[in-house]
Image: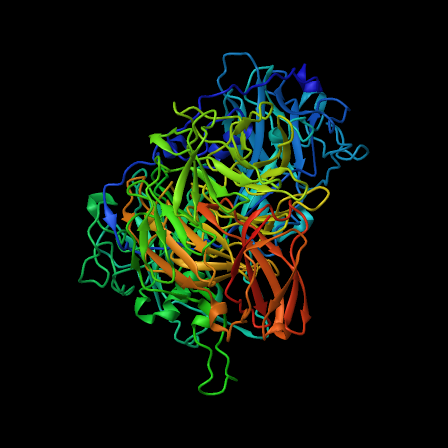
Amino acid sequence: MHASGSAPSLGSPFTQEPLMRRCKLPRAVEHPVRSALLALGLTLGLAFVSCQDERSITDARHAPRLAASVQTATVVISPTADAFLGIDATNYGSAATLNVYTWPDKKIANAIVLKFDLASIPAGATISSAALNLNLTKSDATGDPTYTVTVHKIVNKNPDLTRATGYTYNGANAWTPNTCCYNNIPLAQADIGAPVDTKAVDKTPGFKQWDVTSLVQGWLSTPSTNFGLLVNSDPSKLRDRYRTFSSSEDPVAGNRPYLTVVYAAPAPAPTPSEHSAVLSPTGDTYLGIDANNYATGTTLNVYTWPNDTIANAIVMKFDVGGIPTGSTISSATLRLNLVESDATADPTYTVTAHKILNRNVDPARATGYTYDGVNGWTANTCCRNHIPLAQADISAPVDTKSIDKTPGFKAWDVTSVVQGWLTTPSTNFGLLLNSDPSRLRDRYRFFSSKEDPVVDHRPSLTVVYTAPADSTPPGQTPPPEAQLGQWSAVFPAPIVQLHVHLLPDGTVLSWGLIGDPQVWDPTTGTFTAVPSPSLLFCAGHNFLADGRLLVAGGQIRGDSGLPNTNLFDAATRSWQVAPLMARGRWYPTNTTLPDGEMLTVAGTDQNGAVVPLPEIWDGTGWRQLTTASLELEYYPRDFVAPDGRVFYAGEEQPSRWLDVTGTGRWSDGPPRKQPGWRSYGSAVMYEPGKILYAGGGYNPPTNTAEVIDLNEANPTWRYTGSMAYARLQMNATILPTGDVLVTGGTSASGFNNRAGAVHAAELWSPATGTWTTLASNAVTRTYHSTSLLLPDGRVLHTGSGDGNNAPRELSYELFSPPYLFHGARPALTGLTPTVVGYGQTLQLDTPDGASIRKVTFIRTGSVTHAFDQAGRLVPLAFAPVSSGISVTLPASRTTAPPGPYMLFLVNANGVPSVGRIMRLE
């Protein structure tokens, strides 16, 4: 009987499913992570919206701008300990399963207990969601389709799960006595709170999820109460009904329990150079599906009625005129006090914050019909009787919170909105907080308004900002570009530049779906057609040791890939046709290996079938790695590691190693921190062996970023700072300073939702792990956008369209990073060799040798689909000499695989020289 701990035998509950290859969402695979992802919202409904590359039907030069800022972080926490309690004196802390069981009739006979350490979450953080994830492995064979499992907070007793039993919580001291169970064994039933969440668990194997947001928020607020949680059996069933889940001892790591927590860190305390302001609303109200104004009410309401339809929306205005013009907002937090919730069993209710657009609301007069008592909101069909309720006059969500029923203050991050108001005061039309359109009728949350009689309950906006420096002498104020960078005008392009490559002569080769490949000269702005032997759309590419670009694959139609190999020689502006691969490839990744050979991985063949075997180009032909069969997502984020293996960083959560010696072998690597896929996020090797992976995901995209150092004995992923904007379809570009620039993408859910397009660039500092928001570009660039570092230190930003029914952006822009406005550039006055060797020392002539603080070696880019397949930076050792500086090139081929690189000098002001291109061989 399982009640006493003899768990049923485990088989593999996961069967292989067909691959979804027509869309760019993670395909279904035989792995429990998929179930967890689906539980978190990656529904199959989305999987058939984001479809294959196809011809677009429109051309565009510009698109509307609408950005969403998300300031949350996500952490996945494994239990520090887990066990199940039985109606006996045995401890099951080392068992591979966690059991809930009913025996005899209508009595619980097992209870699962788990403990989690929240040390990775900052004190004072606001938890927006916390989900307990347990992997179901076995169920009873009766006809009962479901089994009710409740989650509770453990109170009074702090259990030691390596010793706890049904009788005692630590092997010595008893649980509080009660008569719940067989022979009056207490089984912790008098030491738990009311149910936190209840789930009717069916018999489908895979991950099940419980909402434990309020419980985790309580632990974080009062750590001394963190005694763990208890997952209870169903006392309403007949005997021998049960569910068995994986424990932390399950031999398959992907099956083990975990807690996913999404949180907003507290606003940082102002530094000496920062100031803070707490603002009260100048006006607030809520809109209803009627013609009434509720500005004098003491509550601000969000409400769902009828089913799946919003019936209220909160509007608020704040005066930010007291914040000095030109200030930089480091955080802006809206806080509302929850006073009442519906009495249904739904534990949470989603409330989104939006910027109001188009209409300058007057809260003292606004209604569901009008924004000022007279003039109507923009017409739309959102709500009952087509009452507009401002739904066509708001931005995409700025922040989203899952609001539990615990009374007290809830917080939304509105930093980007407040910065926008301060920068352009004429756009300050207020904020709107929206009801949850996914709920059944009569679900709601009520918050205190500014008319609440208790002053401390009223809404507030806390803004932390850095004022402009007062000490700068008149006439010497640094230009805004020195902080934000500067975008050029928008220039026309003959094609959608969705594959871009910096050639050894400093020109840029690009192609798209429609039209011939083009070579663009940055010095003149002219394009020259270089027709290709076959369609290169969605091929893989990288530079060979001799400087030629090897292009593997291309498109036949749909997701069917060509087996073609094409080589482009910049010196002759010509293509050469090379021997075919064993199979076609569409969406592969090319990686230049330390010995100069070229690896190509993944993609789909002539028939649209997944290609599991990698192939290697040896200079004359291809060979397959016949013992390295593995199906990977499109365009794997692959990098040569310091030990010579190839490291697969994603898009899937598990990372992997590929040994390319002999016939090849894959082995498991460390899993990333971010749950699920970082689909169409971007990854770069910003220093040898060190990888940044930022953004990605679908529902919704994430603003998180994580890093790994492959030089460590046991590399592990860890979170670094989060971007100001969630993004997918973005591009990460390594700059000469070693910082990483992120451009483009969308914050909105879905594969290519242009409504959430992000125009602001962001800059990540490896030294601090923090992001800085920079200037915004003019053109919406999402799916099929590209960015490429140029030798002059600017970044080409182009593409978007040529697929997914998005407008074809036949244009490009150039971004000048802030470093180009920090003073004179270091000068390289002498000649530099075009071909260099490993470990070679170069004598570089420069009058600025004494001011040089850094020399960087950056591989020339080869970019498509949110990934530079060549991207890596190598810092170089240098020393001053009489004529300039002496620079030592990399000695290791794994540090810098052969091929073309740009060499930059960077001075004490962080200003780079113009790069010199040289081929390392």
The picture quadrant where one finds residue 51 is top left
Quarter occupied by the N terminus:
top right
Q: Is residue 616 left or right of residue 760?
A: right
Q: How many marks?
A: 0
In percent of width and height, residue 72 lies at: 50, 52
The picture quadrant where one finds residue 656 is top right
Depth order, front residue of 874/209: 874
Colour pattern of the rendering: rainbow
Q: Is residue 119 left or right of residue 556?
A: right
Is there any visible trace of residue 746 in the rendered image? no
Q: Residue furthest front?
A: 572
Please name the residue shown 25% across and 62% down the image: 359
Q: Is residue 428 left or right of residue 900?
A: left
Depth order, front residue of 455/397: 397
Q: Residue furthest top?
A: 142
In percent of width and height, residue 480 lies at: 43, 73
Q: Is residue 263 above or below residue 828?
A: above
In percent of width and height, residue 595 lies at: 62, 40
Is there any visible trace of residue 883 in the rendered image? yes
In percent of width and height, residue 640 lies at: 60, 42
Q: Is residue 164 above or below residue 809?
A: above
Q: Residue furthest right?
A: 172
Depth order, front residue of 186/528: 528
